[in-house]
Image (cartoon, rainbow, N blue to C red):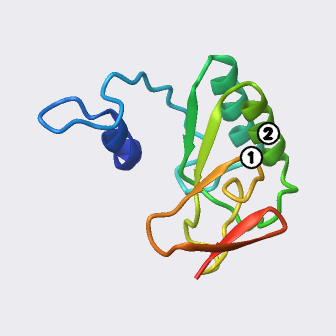
Amino acid sequence: FPVTIAHTAGAIGANGVIKGVAPNVTFMLYKVCNSGGSCYTEDIISAIENATLRGADVISISLGSATYLDESPICDSVMNAMNNGTIVVASAGNRWAYGSIGCPACCKYAIADRTKHGFVGGVEGCLYWG
């Protein structure tokens, strides 16, 4: 797998001496950010919709934006995925203001994942940590 997904793919699908949580997983890979690190809303939505249509059980997204409310068009695609039986897990963080969770992790129907700091509450459909 490309290095860009190793931090999640290895923990999920490792199937050697060390086993991941789902060693027999099949990955669907989508590139939604350009080489400069910019990610366009339309590309993110397209990837979520395509993975949902292809029958993904779980979509793991490791990116974030400065949008902190459940009003982004991305949140509509996350809700549609959930309505079709696909769980969306999104990283909570990725360079934005400390103590806030950007989109898509702040979407009402996404599971926000953060390995550092505990979640302490919710505001406008978003969780904040301290």
Q: Nearer the viewer, residue 117 or 95?
A: 117
Q: Residues within 10 Å of mark 2 (few under 14, many from 20)?
A: some
Q: Quadrant of residue 2?
A: top left
Camera-side residue of 103 and 36: 103
* Circles 1 and 2 in contact, beta carbons < 8 Å: yes
Locate residue 60, reporting x and y percent.
54, 42
Q: Is residue 13 left or right of residue 110?
A: left
Q: Which residue is mark 1?
A: 109
Q: Secondary structure at mark 1?
A: loop
Residue positioned 33% across, 44% down in the render: 11
Residue 83, disc: none
User: Which residue is at 45% across, 71% downward?
Assistant: 116
Q: Residues within 10 Å of mark 1 (few under 14, many from 20)?
A: many
| Label located before the other in sequence (1 or 2) | 2
In this orientation, does residue 33 appear? no
| Amino acid at pointer 1 | Tyr
Real-space CA distance between mark 1 and mark 2, rounded to the nearest whole angstrom: 6 Å
